Image (cartoon, grey):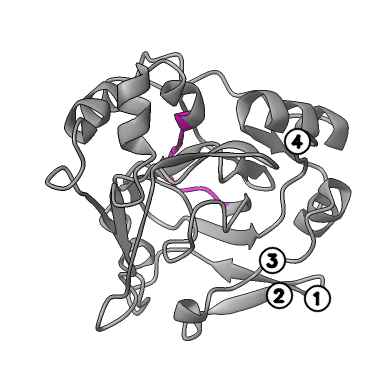
Amino acid sequence: MTTTKHVCSSIQEARNHLTELGFSIIQGITPTDVARELNIGLPVIPSYYKNENTITLEGDGFLDISAKQNAEHRGFNSGEAQELHVDGTLYKMGGIKTTLLVCIEPAVTGGESIVFQACCAYETLSRNLQIALQDIRALERASVSLSTPEIVSDAVFTESHTYGLQTRFSIDNTSTWRFDLVPNLDEAYEKLMLLTTVGSPLFFEFKLNAGEILVLANDKVSHGRRAFVGNRRMLRGIYTSSHHQIIG
């Protein structure tokens, strides 16, 4: 079941949605102009994607994340579903703050985007479960592009003076939750998972059309996609800057 999709008609509306919801959808503007208007700089391409197929939009590098059989990243080489995750697998908390997903060609069947308001979900938990999620041993993520995976361990959530509550909530094939190391982490995980299903007020599912851009506050929400059949061409830009910060 898909969520009613709202497509913003202006960059200011998109900015407001991004602040309020953690994501927004916009069309009628190039991704380069979206990034400039949000003042998030240029996209970065992690070194572990150096062999991936990249293309250029208006002089700025975006990663082609369309399904390709020869893609080294397992998430990019098939139409299988991608579970919820944040971008920047080997980055520490908040390293990648913004993601732009540009739909060039939607899949004929499937391929819906999913978004989970992870930080909002964290706020519903008891303090002892929040503490478990802030343990720096809680979540390991490993690159699936490397023959010898590199592993980065960090908290699932942290409270930043500059950027507020941040998350790296991920349950995809890069992720290992260390229930064996962190007390109460299993209970926190189970309660969060209950909120990642269709019908939860914190879970959104929609299908992007050609020309639409999904803007994600990558340190506030997690995202993924449903399985699909046929061609689905998507471009992705990830950014180390946010469209806003908290001045305290």
Q: Which residue is mark 2?
A: 56
The picture quadrant where one finds residue 19 is: top right
Q: Badge 3 is on which residue?
A: 43
**Where does residue 238 sit, x and y in percent of width and height?**
62, 60
Q: Residue at x 34, y 69 (%)?
A: 143
The residue located at (59%, 60%) in the rendering is 236
Please determine whether, in this image, residue 246 is positioned above or below residue 145: above
Q: Residue furthest left?
A: 180
Q: Nearer the viewer, residue 37 or 205?
A: 37
Q: Residues within 10 Å of mark 2 (few under 14, many from 20)?
A: few
Answer left or right for 194 relative to 23.
left
Would you name the residue on which mark 4 appears? Answer: 246
Mark 2 residue type: Thr
**In what element is the residue under mark 4?**
loop
Cβ–Cβ below 8 Å for labels 1 and 3?
Answer: no
Q: CA distance from mark 3 to mark 2?
A: 11 Å
| Residue corresponding to mark 1 | 59
Residue sitting at x 36%, y 71%? 73
In the rendered structure, which amino acid carries the disc numbered 1? Gly
Check disc 1 and report its element: helix, strand or loop: loop
Give residue 112's quadrant in the image. Answer: top left
Is 124 displayed left or right of 96 in the figure? left
